[in-house]
Amino acid sequence: MYEIVGAKGNIQDIDDFLKQVKEFSEKNGIIIQLFDADLIFGEKHIISAFKHAKRAINQKTNTTNSLEMELMLYAAGERQLKLAIPKMGINEGKSNLAIVFIGKDGKLNQIVQSFFEHFKLKRDDKVLEGDENTLKKFGLTKTEISTVAKAKYQDLILEKVALVDIIK
């Protein structure tokens, strides 16, 4: 079971924030992965990355030792964490966040609500919507973007996610 949400927040210290998120996730028995939502092109982007990451772990073709880091690789469309984290990781200051909560029980909804209260974040799923600017930030060129109609922009990102399997 998973839940994907968008949020707005102001992160003063990334290391401290990530440490607190890790403690929160361990306390609640769930996995939490955070992304810079400005590079996410819709919920399908994260769902595709999640499915690829789970499959890689199940088939023992994973590169990393955790689902959250494997998810980071696929969401970034990268093969190496040293490229994926700077690309998709969260930033200090006012930020748009994409957050994935992965858990096994039916209490996930309550945990998500508690997370927002604990970290004083404002839920805003609109930050997950992508546009042409998202594609450029993701690293796609104008030429690549011009090859498809606006209605197919998300497909360009999904292709990058799927290509991670090929470049492994």
Image (cartoon, rainbow, N blue to C red):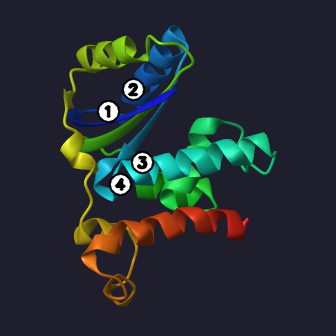
Mark 3 or mark 2: whose residue is earlier in sequence = 2
Residue type at tag 4: Ile
Per the model, the C-alpha gap separating discs 2 and 1 is: 5 Å
Image coords of residue 132 (percent x, y): 25, 72
Q: Which residue in the structure is indicated by mark 1?
A: 13
Identify the residue shown where x is 39% and y is 77%.
Answer: 140
Name the quadrant containing residue 113: top left
Per the model, the C-alpha gap separating discs 2 and 4 is: 24 Å
Question: Is there a contact, CB below 8 Å, between mark 3 and mark 1?
Answer: no
Mark 1 or mark 4: whose residue is earlier in sequence = 1
Image coords of residue 53 (percent x, y): 63, 46
Name the quadrant containing residue 143: bottom left
Per the model, the C-alpha gap separating discs 3 and 2 is: 14 Å
Residue type at tag 2: Asp
Residue type at tag 1: Asp
Front tag of 3 and 1 = 3
Question: Is there a contact, CB below 8 Å, between mark 2 and mark 1?
Answer: yes
Q: Which residue in the structure is indicated by mark 3?
A: 89
Image coords of residue 44 (percent x, y): 41, 52
Identify the residue shown where x is 43% and y is 54%.
Answer: 45
